[in-house]
Image (tube, coloured by chain):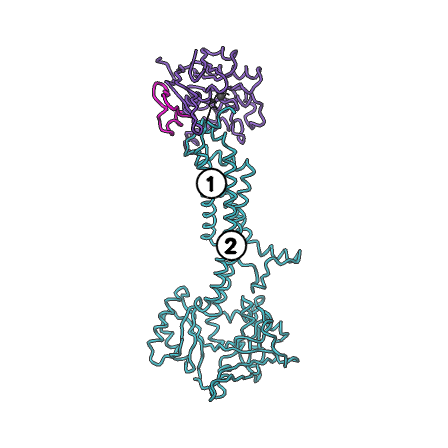
Amino acid sequence: MTDTLLAAEGVTKEYSIGSRTIAVLRGVDFALARGETVALLGSSGAGKSTLLHVLGLLDSPTAGRVAFEGRRVDDLRIDERARLRHARIGFVFQFYHLIPELTAYDNVRLGSMMDRGLFAWLRTRRALSARSKDLLERVGLGERTSHRPAELSGGERQRVAIARALIAEPAAILADEPTGNLDSKTAADVLDLLFGVSRERGLALLLVTHDEALAKRCDRVVRLHDGRIVD
Amino acid sequence: MYRWFLALRWLVTRPINLLGVLAVTVGVWALIVVVSIFSGYLTEIGRHLQSSTSDATVVRLPDDARFARIEEVLRRDPNVAAVAPRIVWQGLVHPLGDDAGKAPPPAGMAELGAPTPFVAILGVDFEKERDVSGLDAWVKDVADGSVRASDPANPLAQVGDLPAVMLGRQRMQDDGARRGERVKVTTGRLVADRSGERLDFDDGEYVAAGAFESSFAAFDAFNVFVDIATLRAQLRSGERRVPDDWCNEIAIRLHDPRDAEATVARLTRLLDAIDDAPRGPGLLVRTWAEANKAQIGNVEHQRSLMKLVLFVIMVVAAFQVYSTMSMTVTEKQHDIGILTALGARRAGVLSLFLTSGIAIATVGAVLGVGLGCLSAIGLDDFNTAMRAVFDVDLFPVRVYNLKRVPYELDPTWIGQVAGVAIALGALVAAVPAWRASRHDPAVSLRND
Ligand SMILES: Nc1ncnc2c1ncn2[C@@H]1O[C@H](COP(=O)(O)OP(=O)(O)OP(=O)(O)O)[C@@H](O)[C@H]1O
Ligand SMILES: [Mg+2]
């Protein structure tokens, strides 16, 4: 377990609606090693997104702990969690979540602005602009940098989102059904890209999916059932 | 950093934001244009009132007041530059033409600037008066500088064997009177008799020796100038006895008019200390501003009222910015979620929307200030053009007795308006921004 990047230990997550309490995660133990690709399967409503959010520090567990590089992080201050999330974790979502008013290029650049003040950003902007262009080139959108999300296809949007997730040079990518909205051909291309960059950069990849065939391309497959991880 | 980037991008790409900008622009524009015109008008009247009243005056001098003695006292003050006697009296003036017997119009018809025989008769010593008020300039034609009077050296000098009266140029025109024509000047005064007091009238025949024109038409319409000696003689006839150099008002020009208040206080003390100084009830030394307090205060009050009324536009603009920001936050739930996922902090999200609101208000304020200043400067030309082309008088300058639309751009006021606009923008954006920062990213990022 020396090379564990991201781990959940006995994580539970409960939502209370009115007087009712729903336990979505009931003691999840899970570890994502450095550079490893893992598929997370589970029926709809099983709590896959919830687990992804807890692991990505977007949400706090009700009980249990989340560790990053061996250090407990779920109890960090909200600002420190934000910093960690920015620097080390990249997200890719089913619905891309690009900012509609920004071009592909600006959407990618935006990912590099989060932790920088105005002056810090101005100092580093040349390098970051070049990196944004390189990443768009890498995801195959070198010609589409000035297009807005509305002018791009679903697959292209997801490529922009992947480039954005990579700009801050994270150690892990958490992808929540990144191909859920794409036809199988496009889905395969996007997954090729994700696996490709993960391999090139030694990124850990947690891939939430419904597709057993896609899941098989990962190093490891885990299933979320009844609020627990089963292999 | 991203908050500037996004706030500015949103500002230019989201049409709804332009609505907020427009509202702020209109509010700032209105506050600047209207208040600038009022301020310009105030300055204009102030300048005129100062030049007609003179920097300071001694008023309500009693019947035994002697100019020479008081002048001597007043001149002891180092700030006193010139002193002139005046007799200010009420009266009626009408031309002695064909319609010599014409009755005065009913009181209601005597509107501002309309011909009315009721005037203030100002008895002045031309040589002295020209040193304290604007009279010297008023008798000169603006175009060629020539003196509009029979005797340019002393426009109030006798013409033949009749005394001279100077009428306002507009009054001369309205009355159809020409220079050299005879006019009747009637004065009245209270005379004590056994049953109490009675009003004695006295007619004098004068010659319209010239015309004067100040920058303020109302002054021209309601004042005439005559020689002080003539008026004194006319008022003295009968039982009333006054000294040979009697006057009921003394006009003072100061070396430094800004020091008027302190000078007036010193002059009051000087006059009080003199044993034989006139001690009429209510004798008063006052600055031109005090003398015209009512008139200036009236316009100032109107200006304050306008500020208040126009501030309502600003409040409406603030509501517009609020609803714009509120809609933006609601619409941007997903973007807030993704920004959080990318590493934005709560404070960052808060300040993003705060910056957005401030950006809207700032752009609106800058546009409003620019347009406001341009409008104020160009209003007179615009007004003239509208009058010439469409025969529409947007700003009837004559009603305000002015020659052009006045304006005065006060940097302090402009700064205040812009500052308040931006502060209001920040204030109303704070609530939606707070809501945005409380938003749970996990909710908007779930795939449904
Ligand atoms: N904020 C919330 N309040 C109450 N219940 C919630 C909340 N968020 C999630 N849930 C519930 O938690 C359960 C798990 O949701 P989650 O989105 O993690 O499922 P999922 O495995 O990602 O499903 P899908 O495959 O459909 O995306 C669902 O039953 C959902 O209704
Ligand atoms: Mg899900």
How packed is label 2: few (under 14 Cα within 10 Å), some, or many (20 or more)?
few
Residue A109 against residue B95 in the figure, above or below: above
Subunit under mark 1? B
Q: Which of B223 and B244 is in front in this view?
A: B223
Which segment is the magenta one?
A58-84
Residue designated by label 2:
B309
Q: In which quarter of the image is the C terminus of chain A?
A: top left
Q: Which of B270 and B178 is in front in this view?
A: B270
Quarter of image, res A14: top left
The residue at 55%/39% (across/down) is B16
The residue at 47%/74% (across/down) is B129
Queried whether the magenta region covers residue A59, the answer comes back as yes
Q: Position of residue B193 (x, y in %)?
A: 47, 88
**Chain B visual colour:** cyan
Disc 1 residue type (three-letter)? Ala
**Chain A visual colour:** purple
Label 2 or label 1, whichever comes before in sequence order: 2
